[in-house]
Amino acid sequence: MKNMEKYTQVFVEMFGKSADEVKNLHYQDIIEWDSVGHMTLMSTLEDTFDIMMETDDIIDFDSYEKGIEILKKYNVDFES
């Protein structure tokens, strides 16, 4: 499975939305993405990609799209 598929799948499983729906999600758009959901999402992404995000990146991670940008800082390749 490619990294983009893994990334999208985490959102799909966490929030119970379709792959198309999660691509437009922002923090607190849905009840499931509250502060507890956010920390669970961060932990799941760290486990999925074997990384440890800095606190500032966790705070800045406020949308599906922004997450891609942040994960690229940790050498997560979304191109291949």
Image (spheres, grey):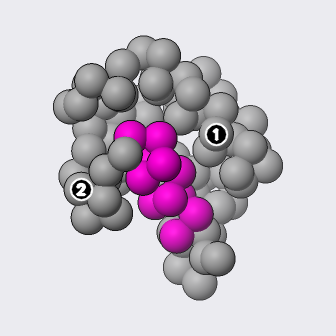
Seen as rendered, the residue at the extreme top is 35
Any magenta on residue 57? no
SS assignment at label 1: helix
Q: Position of residue 7 (x, y in %)?
A: 53, 58
Task: Tell me the residue that label 2 is attached to.
Answer: 21
Identify the residue shown where x is 36% and y is 28%: 33
Where does residue 11 sit, x and y in percent of width and height?
A: 44, 49
State the separation of the CA atoms marked 2 and 1: 19 Å
Category of crowding for the residue at label 2, using alpha-carbon neighbours closer than 10 angstroms: few (below 14), some (14–19), many (at least 20):
few
Q: Which residues are magenta?
A: 5-15
Secondary structure that dominates the magenta span: helix
Quadrant hosting residue 31: top left
**Closest to the observer, 1 or 58:** 1
Q: The N terminus is located in which quarter?
A: bottom right
Task: Give the residue displayed 50% in from the left and 59% down from the top.
Answer: 9
Find out whether the residues at labels 2 and 1 contact each other: C-beta distance under 8 Å: no
Q: Relative to 60, say whether 66 is above or below.
A: below
Q: Residues within 10 Å of mark 1 (few under 14, many from 20)?
A: some
Q: Nearest the camera: 52 or 2? A: 2
Q: Which residue is mark 1?
A: 44
Q: Which residue in the rendered view is the most extreme toward the right?
A: 50
Residue sticking out furthest to the front:
16
- In x, y percent, where is residue 72? 57, 57
Q: Position of residue 8 (x, y in %)?
A: 46, 60
Tell me the amino acid under the disc marked 1: Thr
- Could you tell me if residue 66 is visible in this image? no
Would residue 72 appear left or right of 12 to someone viewing this image? right
Amino acid under label 2?
A: Glu
Mark 2 element type? helix
Say which residue appears at 26% left-offset and 38% top-offset: 26
